[in-house]
Image (cartoon, rainbow, N blue to C red):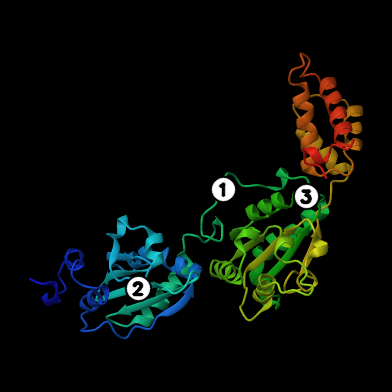
């Protein structure tokens, strides 16, 4: 019997039927047959960015299972507009990225059949079309709500692409040496903000924050971000300048942050894409400012940016509460913090108080990363010395490293 004349029944094996029919029929006819309609009509596509599409499709299987149904067949097509399938697979074998390009899903629910089609409009947008034999709007609304609450990316550490970062271990305040003032301020601005969000809302406090961390290279700004991310139960999105080359990419990452809120959005090296406009046009900067204080609501969103060059950041971005509310300096370590860091780095050797104080004084003006290099250089110099485990040997290496790094060869080994 030809697939064109197969009668529609509740008991029919759609997976088997579609598998045979796929050879002969285009997707529009298959959809019409699956829906029990003579035509594939009544479909109004919704244009959305790639992030939105990815978030929805990422949990379509769980949503369909939640409704007591099954995804009986998926077709994914080439992105050249040709309607011939180049990729066919049952759902459990399907490659999600292939479906993201352009394709159709056939979903069977109790009492209804649904066809979901994804079409590629441009490199950054997709059109998602949902047609149900019992009403399409309700399915899409329920799907979107389910995706917000049950998305597998919620609470993860991710890149804008949706790739999940491996959490090697949670960081805490013991993993970094900073002044008590910086620790208290950041803890209040981030952890307290999330923990007391409901109480703050009852008093009319906006449920979004923006923070810029600035200071010389190597002072621990990125590690501070990891510590802050470990203190809260929130989605964390890590962006580099390469992730924000175009205004559309700013729109996507902000959509991702809102959809998966509560969220911390980390923007590394802000100066590389948000410098002062001068006489030129910086479309990425313009879109970032619009997204941070525009019409979109950024509830439950904390944006934390890092920079080594605060002076070049656009003043309209850094000096306006509602975009970035606090600008916090992360300076080189003071004497107390340098001593704390050195004791941690040198805990395996016994160093006299005099040698410790001399090292603390000699590393004045150095960042945490530079002090780590001083200690590493001392241990490397002592590695082939028979008395290498002696505190005096290490102390000599520390003194030599400080002298070397301060004698004009700093630049050659990463010092500035």
SS category of the residue bearing label 1? loop
- Residue for badge 1: 167
The answer to whether residue 402 shows anywhere in this view is: yes
Question: Which of the two marks, 1 or 2, is nearer to us in this view?
Answer: 2
Q: Nearer the viewer, mark 3 or mark 1?
A: 3
Extreme residue in the bottom direction: 42
Left or right for 19, reference 400? left
Q: Where's residue 286, x and y in %?
A: 69, 74
Q: Counting other residues with Cα less than 10 Å from the Cα at mark 2, is it few (<14), some (14-19), or many (20 or more)? A: many
At numbered mark 3, what does the secondary structure look like: helix, strand or loop? loop
Which residue occupies 31% across, 56% down? 92
Secondary element under disc 2, as helix, strand or loop, is strand
The tag earlier along the polypeptide, 3 or 1, is 1
Residue 332 versus residue 32 in the image, above or below = above
Q: Observer-nearest residue: 351 or 239?
A: 239
Residue for badge 3: 217
Q: Along the polypeptide, which appears first: circle 3 or circle 2?
A: 2
Residue matched to label 2: 117
**Contact (Cβ within 8 Å) of mark 3 with mark 1:** no
């Amino acid at each position: 019997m030809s697939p064109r004349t197969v009668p529609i029944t509740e008991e029919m094996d759609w997976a088997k039927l579609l598998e045979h029919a796929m050879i002969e029929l285009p997707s529009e006819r298959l959809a019409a047959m699956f829906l029990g309609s003579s035509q594939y009509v009544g479909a109004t596509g919704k244009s959305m960015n790639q992030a939105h599409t990815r978030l929805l499709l990422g949990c379509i299987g769980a949503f369909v299972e939640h409704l007591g149904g099954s995804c009986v067949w998926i077709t994914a097509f080439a992105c050249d507009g040709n309607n011939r399938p180049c990729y066919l697979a049952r759902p459990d074998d399907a490659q999600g990225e292939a479906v993201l390009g352009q394709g159709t899903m056939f979903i069977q629910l109790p009492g209804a059949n649904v066809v979901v089609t994804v079409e590629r409009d441009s490199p950054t947008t997709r059109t998602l079309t949902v047609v149900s034999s019992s009403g399409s709007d309700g399915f899409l609304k329920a799907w979107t709500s389910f995706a917000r609450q049950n998305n597998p990316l919620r609470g993860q550490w991710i890149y804008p692409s949706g790739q999940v970062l491996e959490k090697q271990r949670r960081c805490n305040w013991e993993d970094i040496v900073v002044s008590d003032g910086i620790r208290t301020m950041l803890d209040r601005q981030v952890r307290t903000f999330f923990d007391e969000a409901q109480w703050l809302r009852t008093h009319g406090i906006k449920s979004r924050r923006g923070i810029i961390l600035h200071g010389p290279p190597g002072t621990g700004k990125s590690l501070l971000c990891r510590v802050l991310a470990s203190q809260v139960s929130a989605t964390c999105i890590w962006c580099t300048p390469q992730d924000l080359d175009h205004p559309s990419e700013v729109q996507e990452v902000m959509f991702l942050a809102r959809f998966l809120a509560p969220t911390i959005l980390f923007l590394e090296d802000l100066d590389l894409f948000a410098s002062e406009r001068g006489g030129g046009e910086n479309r990425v900067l313009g879109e970032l400012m619009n997204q941070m204080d525009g019409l979109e609501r950024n509830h439950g969103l904390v944006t934390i940016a890092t920079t080594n060059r605060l002076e070049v950041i656009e003043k309209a971005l850094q000096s306006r509460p509602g975009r970035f509310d606090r600008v916090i300096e992360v300076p080189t370590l003071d004497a107390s913090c340098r001593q704390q860091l050195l004791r941690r780095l040198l805990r395996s050797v016994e160093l006299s108080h005099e040698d410790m104080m001399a090292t603390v004084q000699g590393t004045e003006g150095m960042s945490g990363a530079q002090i780590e290099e001083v200690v590493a250089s001392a241990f490397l110099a002592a590695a082939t010395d028979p008395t290498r485990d002696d505190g005096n040997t290490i102390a000599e290496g520390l003194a030599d490293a400080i002298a070397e790094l301060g004698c004009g060869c700093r630049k050659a080994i990463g010092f500035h």
